[in-house]
Amino acid sequence: MTRTFISAMRLLCLSLVLSGAQAVLAQGKPIDDEALSDVWGQALFTLANTSENGYDFSRITLNADIKLNANLGGIRLGEYTSSIRNGTGADIDIARLQFGRSDGTLAQRTVSVTDPYVEFVYRNVANSATREVVGMRLGFGGIQGDIGLQMNAVSGALLIDAGASGTIDSRNDTLGGKRWDGTTCTNAASCQVALSQVGGVTAGNASGASRDFFISVLKSAVTFPTNAATGLPTDQAMAGFWLNWRDRLSALNVRAAVPANVVGK
């Protein structure tokens, strides 16, 4: 269930190590106060601890700007039998995921990611002095660019502007977004586009990057703290794997046409 997630975590940890390599190897020398006053810097990592709704959150953020061009396929996270809705048998089932495209402008060849973070969730065990790890999430402070997608089903909080076809909003799902394929809504008129029809998304718009992307893995449902960038409360993330993405997101097309992305072209 967690092999792909662990691989992603290993990749993140490797990037953190490589990002910090220069600082480890560099030799410093003392400077006087006048010279020091002209120096500005930012910590490579920041740690923030918060508490809300009976949970404690510890977030480690890498203060970095990253450009990605990559193709992934066959992503299935959270494979188990779900009593809520079994769907395709996985919480997140994405056949293709492409960061960037090679059929557009130079700027469209990569996707920009800022401030990647890992956040751990804890709670105190009743009538005990011990603390329990409930789970974690991996997210970005911002993500901007064209992302090719072939989604079969997703557990999560999604909001995609599909233009003339309306919106794709998991809040319309009768079962709260668990293993949702976009076809089951409280009102049939709200389900004009299935997730499988979306060929990709544009993250961000003229106002800036999309600011609320994260994937969580949890033992029980958790409501994460309000997103400081958007000022909006976060939908409750269910147990298992959960994808949150509702900010400044629009469909590239609703014809299931994933744009070409020849890596390195």
Image (cartoon, rainbow, N blue to C red):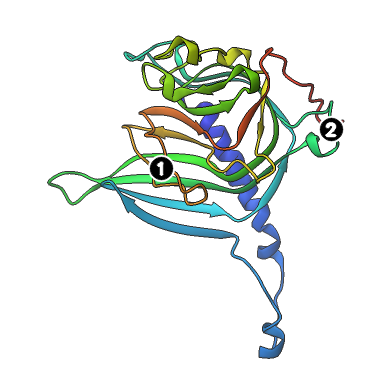
Q: Amino acid at mark 1?
A: Pro
Q: Secondary structure at mark 2?
A: loop
Horizontal arrangement in the rendering, residue 227 relative to residue 63 (left or right): left
Nearest to the eye among marks 1 and 2: give it.
1
Q: Position of residue 42 (x, y in %)?
A: 62, 66
* Residue at left offset 57%, top offset 39%: 10
Q: Which mark is residue 264?
A: 2
Q: Amino acid at mark 2?
A: Gly
* Vertical position of residue 165 compared to residue 225: above or below: above
Horizontal arrangement in the rendering, residue 90 relative to residue 51 (left or right): right
* Residue at left offset 49%, top offset 16%: 190
Q: Which of the image's four quarters has the C terminus?
A: top right
Q: Position of residue 259 (x, y in %)?
A: 76, 21
Q: Secondary structure at mark 1?
A: loop
Q: Which mark is residue 189?
A: none
* Residue at left offset 31%, top offset 49%: 52
Q: Position of residue 72 (x, y in %)?
A: 66, 25
Q: Position of residue 257 (x, y in %)?
A: 72, 15
Asked if disc 1 and disc 2 are in contact, CB closer than 8 Å, the reply is no
Callout 1 crowding tier (Cα within 10 Å): few <14, some 14–19, many ≥20: few
Q: CA distance from mark 1 to mark 2?
A: 39 Å
Q: Total label count? A: 2
* Vertical position of residue 216 compared to residue 197: above or below: below
* Vertical position of residue 248 compared to residue 155: above or below: below
Callout 2 crowding tier (Cα within 10 Å): few <14, some 14–19, many ≥20: few
**Upstream in the sequence, badge 1 or badge 2?**
1
Residue furthest to the left in view is 127
Residue receiving disc 1: 233
* Residue at left offset 50%, top offset 13%: 191
